[in-house]
Amino acid sequence: GIVASPNDFGRMGARPKHRELLDYLANQFVDGGWKFKPLHKTILMSSTYRQAATSPASAAGMAKDPENELLWKFSRRRLTAEEVRDSMLAASGRLNLKAGGPSIMVPVDEELTKLLYKPGQWQVAKDKSEHDRRSVYLIYKRNLRLPIMEAFDAPDMLLSCPRREQSTHAPQALELMNGPFANEIARTFAARLDAEAKTPDAQVTLAYRLTAGRAPSLQEKKIALDFLKANPLSEFALAMLNLNAFLYVD
């Protein structure tokens, strides 16, 4: 998602490629004293980063560079496995932002722990709030993968992974609709909506703000309100966690 245009970085020439862009940013990183903040500012302030995926120039861009090799727009991408889990926790209000400390083990099905050479090695953290830590703090075993991580293409730890693949398949939808983690988070999300917004209209608006980062359209709000007339809030919360607007970054 790191993008730049000729107007952003004059040293890169008139038609920057991926390699030139990465070389330029690497040099900026070194010249900036190996500090991330100036590098992040350079990227975020670039005109290409700030432009939408669709614009009056989109038709011309698609005609000249349909594969986006010149990085003229931000390519749509799905959240990685870790981002999916963390975003679900964040939307529900459960994400534990504690930083640092040892990695933790979260509850998993007994069938998964039996795959370990010594099942007793999997010692779940006693403090339940630790279970909601960001995914970067989870312990990974080569022969034990969390279902939601496996479904969304997290590396299996058995082989080197220089580049993560992105697939789309039925188990992803099944995990998000029927998986125990997704349904538990949906119940917590519903409880948050109920506590912070007292009317169905307000609950729908808040749900879209927390998952899609925007207000619902009139049609989306009507569909959601009609759904809530016949279904519990937890089912609506689960549906919101399955939206493309939640799972993809445009």
Image (tube, rainbow, N blue to C red):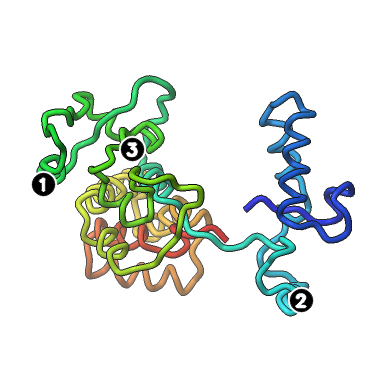
The residue under label 1 is which amino acid type?
Glu
Residue 117 sits above or below residue 186 on the image:
above
Instruction: Tell me, for residue 64, which label it has, or none.
Output: 2
Q: Are discs 2 and 1 less than 8 Å apart at CB?
A: no
Image point (77%, 72%), residue name? 57
Query: What is the spatial separation of the Cα atoms under label 2 and label 3, in whole angstroms?
Result: 45 Å
Q: Quadrant of the C terminus?
A: bottom right
Q: Are discs 2 and 3 less than 8 Å apart at CB?
A: no
Image point (14%, 40%), residue name? 113
Q: Quadrant of residue 239?
A: bottom left
Could you say where residue 81 lies in the image, as x and y percent from the top left? 39, 50
Q: Residues within 10 Å of mark 3 (few under 14, many from 20)?
A: some
**Which residue corresponds to mark 1?**
111
Q: Nearer the viewer, residue 22 or 89?
A: 22
In the visual, does 84 lie left or right of 49? left
In the visual, does 228 lie left or right of 6? left
Q: Nearer the viewer, residue 178 or 205?
A: 178
SS assignment at label 3: loop
Image point (42%, 30%), residue name? 97
Instruction: Tell me, for residue 94, which label it has, or none.
Output: 3
Q: Nearer the viewer, residue 142 or 208?
A: 142
| Label 2 vs 3, first from the N-terminus | 2
SS assignment at label 1: helix
